[in-house]
Image (cartoon, rainbow, N blue to C red):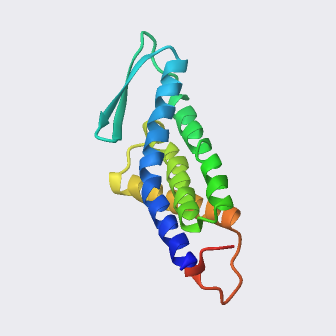
Amino acid sequence: MLRSKKIAADLVVTALVPLVAVWLYELSNMAVLSAQGASVSLTVAGWVPVGVAGVSSAAPSPLTKMAQILLSTGSLLPLTVLFSKAKLFLARAFLLSTAGAFLASTYWELLSLLTVVPMAVHLGIFLVATASISFALLKGFMGPRPLGTSPSALSP
């Protein structure tokens, strides 16, 4: 009975990870733009932030988005530790995969510096980067699994 409650709690927390991640991403965007002196506002649809608008007399620094991505990814670290301590392994794995997508999104910020190639190529590069970074994070934080261990156990 206790095991099924633990699994249910893990699933509920995992379902909330995308909402928390979007909030952290947009709040990080607000913080970075505010630090550059912009007047910012957050648009919310229901419980979900859908964008940040910033008005500034100066052009944003090329490092603005990079700083926002690093801040939002770094803000996931305390949740990773919390999920580990609470043994919410599915939520932790999903959160680490989300961090991988955040880090891979730096590629989109570099597109303006790259030569023109078809969008399908850019999408492919982004997907490979996301999968690679997410795998590396999962392997680094979740540890290798001994042979014969069930992947459904989701514990190191």
Give percent across and percent down for residue 122.
41, 52
Residue 62 shows up from this direction: no
Q: Is residue 78 left or right of residue 57?
A: right
Q: Is residue 139 left or right of residue 109?
A: right
Give percent across and percent down for residue 33.
48, 23
Point out the image quarter for the C terminus: bottom right
Q: Residue furthest top?
A: 57
Q: Residue furthest left?
A: 45
The quarter of the displayed image where residue 49 is located: top left
Vertical placement of residue 40 versus 20, above or below:
above
Residue 10 shows up from this direction: yes
The quarter of the displayed image where residue 42 is located: top left
Between 74 and 17, which is closer to the camera in this rendering? 17
Q: Is residue 53 left or right of residue 149?
A: left
Vertical placement of residue 52 versus 34, above or below:
below
Between 109 and 134, which is closer to the camera in this rendering? 134
Q: Is residue 131 left or right of residue 85?
A: left
Q: What residue is shown at x 44% (from left), y 54% (from top)? A: 16
Q: Residue furthest bottom?
A: 148
Give percent across and percent down for residue 146.
71, 83
Q: What residue is shown at x 34% (from left), y 51% (from top)? A: 119
